[in-house]
């Protein structure tokens, strides 16, 4: 019996939003991506400053997915990120190196502040 990929994607988006809520991002939720109903092209919202493209597929097409995330986040100021997984695997996050370095530097600055107190 063929797997309904739309249903699989929807389930992953719901699971991802739930996982982000577990991490403390209480406003995380799946968006309605059809017909431009939300004004936000993210698959999941709730991480401030991050545009989430969520993919649950066996065949990874990371560059295509990242192109979509970049396109959809253009003009928003959000950093594009692809949250992806395949069956029976953990969720991974892919983002451009420059954006990752921006996040890392923010984290590193916070560590220096903690050490200085």
Image: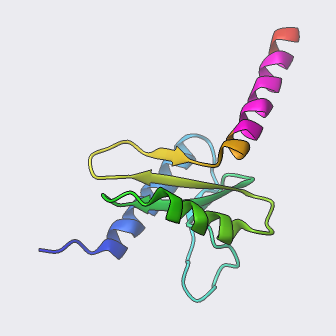
Q: Can residue 117 be spotted in the picture?
A: no
Q: Can residue 111 be spotted in the picture?
A: yes
- Which residue is rendered at x = 62% and y = 42% of the image? 24
Name the residue furthest left.
1
Question: What type of secondary structure mainly makes up the magenta span?
Answer: helix
**Observer-nearest of 49 and 27:** 49
Give the quadrant of the C terminus. top right
Identify the magenta region: 101-113
Left or right relative to 74: residue 2: left
Residue 101 vertical placement versus 113 (above, below): below
Residue 45 vertical placement versus 71 (above, below): above
- Which residue is rendered at x = 46% and y = 44% of the image? 92
Q: Position of residue 42 (x, y in %)?
A: 61, 67
Q: Position of residue 34 (x, y in %)?
A: 54, 84
Left or right relative to 66: residue 48: right
Left or right relative to 8: residue 29: right
Q: How is the image coloured?
A: rainbow
- Which residue is rendered at x = 17% and y = 74% of the image? 2
- Which residue is rendered at x = 54% and y = 55% of the image? 82
Q: Position of residue 61 (x, y in %)?
A: 43, 60
Left or right relative to 93: residue 91: left
Magenta stretch holds residue 38:
no
Name the residue furthest bottom.
35
The image quarter containing residue 46 is bottom right
Q: Position of residue 77 (x, y in %)?
A: 81, 60
Name the residue furthest front.
63
């Amino acid at each position: 019996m063929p797997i309904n990929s739309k249903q699989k994607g929807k389930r992953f988006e719901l699971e991802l939003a739930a996982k982000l809520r577990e991490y403390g991002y209480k406003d995380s939720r799946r968006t309605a991506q059809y017909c431009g109903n939300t004004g936000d092209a993210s698959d999941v919202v709730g991480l401030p400053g991050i545009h989430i493209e969520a993919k649950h597929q066996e065949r990874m097409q990371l560059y295509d997915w990242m192109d979509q995330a970049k396109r959809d986040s253009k003009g928003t100021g959000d950093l594009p990120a692809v949250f992806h997984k395949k069956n029976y695997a953990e969720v991974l996050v892919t983002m451009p190196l420059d954006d990752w370095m921006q996040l890392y530097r923010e984290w590193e600055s916070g560590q220096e502040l903690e050490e200085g107190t």
